[in-house]
């Protein structure tokens, strides 16, 4: 396992009540209610939070990949992340799809950028080999 040499940032949250509770960041920039998926209750769930974090990080990794090639990443670049919570043989599991849109970029170059971003993005690294992940260029 690779160990971090220099910590750049530490996100800190305090959560109570699990999927039916709340979570706040130490700076209070994040202050949310949590609710189970499909419950219809106010709040978000861990799968949505993971999808939001991963997609934001992935766009950053796309920007790094594009910058290496001296290509401007379009401001309309987007990632629709889908994180599934499921069960197999009684065990809870996650799987994900990253649907990446890079308008006005040649599809072959876009595919290269997506593959490189998947190697760079810390969320992709954390999930690699642990959950099924599909990368889709849309």
Image (cartoon, helix red, strand yellow):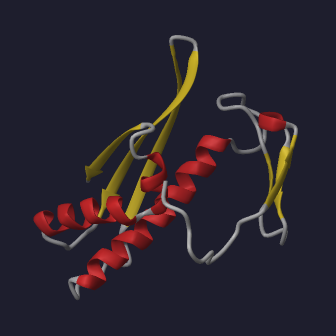
Q: Residue 7 location, x and y as percent?
A: 63, 75
Q: Is residue 112 above or below residue 68?
A: above
| Image point (50%, 56%), residue name | 54
| Image point (34%, 58%), residue name | 118
The one of 90 and 44 positioned closer to us in this rendering: 90
Question: In the figure, is residue 124 to the left or right of 68?
Answer: right
| Image point (19%, 65%), residue name | 112
| Image point (33%, 65%), residue name | 117
Q: Is residue 70 above or below residue 79?
A: below
Question: In the figure, is residue 33 to the left or right of 63?
Answer: right
Q: Is residue 21 above or below residue 106?
A: above
The one of 53 and 4 positioned closer to us in this rendering: 4
Q: Quadrant of residue 66?
A: bottom left
Instruction: Determine the residue located farthest toward the right in the rendered image.
Output: 16
Instruction: Determine the residue located farthest toward the top in the rendered image.
Output: 89
Question: In the figure, is residue 24 to the left or right of 45?
Answer: right
């Amino acid at each position: 396992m690779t160990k971090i040499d220099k910590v750049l940032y530490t996100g800190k949250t305090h959560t109570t009540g699990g999927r039916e509770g709340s979570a706040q960041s130490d700076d209070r920039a994040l202050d949310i209610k949590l609710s189970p998926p499909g419950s219809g209750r106010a709040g978000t769930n861990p799968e949505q939070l993971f999808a939001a974090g991963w997609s934001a990080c992935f766009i950053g990794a796309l920007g790094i990949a594009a910058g290496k090639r001296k290509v401007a990443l379009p401001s309309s670049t987007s990632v629709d992340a889908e994180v599934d919570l499921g069960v197999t043989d009684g065990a809870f599991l996650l799987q994900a799809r990253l649907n990446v849109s890079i308008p006005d970029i040649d599809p072959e170059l876009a595919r290269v950028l997506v593959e490189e971003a998947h190697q760079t993005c810390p969320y992709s690294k954390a999930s690699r080999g642990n959950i099924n992940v599909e990368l889709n260029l849309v």
